Image: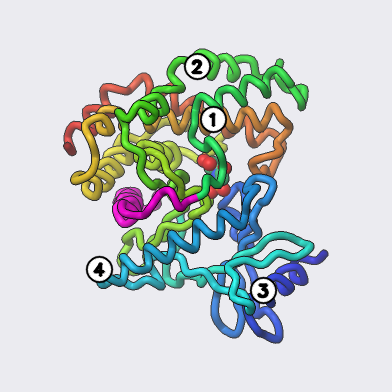
Amino acid sequence: MERISEITKACSAFLSFDSIDEYENIPNGHINVTDRVRINGRDYILQKINTTIFKDPVGLMSNISSVTEFLRGRIIASGGDPDRETLTLVKTHDGSFYHENENGFYRMYLFITDATCYNKAEKKGMFGESAKAFGRFQNLLAEFDAKTLSETIKDFHNTPVRFGNFVKAIDENKAGRKDEVKAEIDFFLARKDYCPTITSRLADGRLPTRVTHNDTKLNNVMIDDASGSGICVIDLDTVMPGSMLYDFGDSIRFGASSAAEDEKDLDRVYCVNELYEEYVSGFLSEMKDTITDEEIACLHDGAIMMTLECGMRFLTDYLEGDTYFRTHYAGQNLDRARTQIKLVSDMEARRDEFEAIIKKYI
Ligand code: GN1
Ligand code: MG
């Protein structure tokens, strides 16, 4: 089916119109398909959910509608603008938050105008602004009842479980690629004992469980074009109970890297200390009243763990034949795994330097 016909059909479940003015694919995410569509002179976001990955899309949409409703209430109470500071779902003609037809499972949001998502911090201060936005997001959700959230992807940041899946992928060797990536495999296998560092502390209560975002890439915050501040946290598919360290760590993994997630020249890949410091400063300025001593002590491990885990997931997917993360060329998942390995090595070797940065802000 032609894309425009597919998009028109999905949109007509939500809105009444004669024809779509324009549409543009937004290629940032690795999982769902996202388009900006202009209808009756107004912009919307249409997303087709990857239901192979999100196996309970109805539960997922119920999480998102309750989280965005809760945020809306908090934002109004504090005098903010809910239409710009949180996502707003558009309902279908029959009052539902999603539409399913023979082409897929769709949702629609109002498009937030005069704000931009970045894959790289283009200006000094931008990464720190994203830190404040993610910190605020977590604070706003501090009183949200975690029990009402369904787990949209089981064991999402359970690194030991991810390690188990990785070992299984090596054993099964589905895509026949195992022998060509021996060095990369060994890198992760050597870190088996490190994998439970966060999960074991969550399990015995040394670390608190909070409602977290769990996918805090820089491109999941919209930066206001006029003020440069992080105005709205997006991509709420993995909002679930988790650790603050996951959100800190995943931000560092992506945003403090000197290069793109799939950079081939590994000499260009390292963790930028100025960016790390910007993030620590912004995040702790928001979290200072709630962060515990144990969380502070493990903050740098959060950065290492999220990078290690993500690298292991990329390599797992490469071994399984690229069935999870969308790829744009052959070998992209291996390139992604290699950048994560380089970043983990760098963050391990420079632990003292990064922990000294954290100390400056507590
Ligand atoms: C995926 O789709 P996107 O880019 O927001 C993935 C994250 C990974 C990230 C790696 C549901 O996020 O966990 O960290 O790719 N999301 C899911 O770039 O698996
Ligand atoms: Mg995303």
- Residue 147 falls inside the magenta stretch: yes
In space, the residues marked 4 and 3 are separated at their CA atoms by: 33 Å
Residue 255 lies, in percent from the top left, at 41, 43
Residue marked by disc 2 = 192
Mark 4 / mark 3, whichever is N-terminal: 3
The magenta stretch spans which residues? 120-149
Q: Mainly helix, strand or loop, the magenta region?
A: helix
Mark 2 / mark 3, whichever is N-terminal: 3
Q: Is residue 75 left or right of residue 6?
A: left
Q: Amino acid at mark 1?
A: Gly
Q: Amino acid at mark 2?
A: Lys
Please, is residue 65 above or below residue 306 in the view?
A: below
Residue marked by disc 3 = 11
Residue marked by disc 1 = 311
Q: Are marks 1 and 2 in contact (CB under 8 Å)?
A: no
Q: Amino acid at mark 4?
A: Ser
Mark 3 / mark 1, whichever is N-terminal: 3
Q: Few, some or many C-alpha atoms within 10 Å of disc 2 (few <14, some 14-19, many ≥20)? A: few
Q: For the point 23% across and 44% down, which residue is it?
A: 290
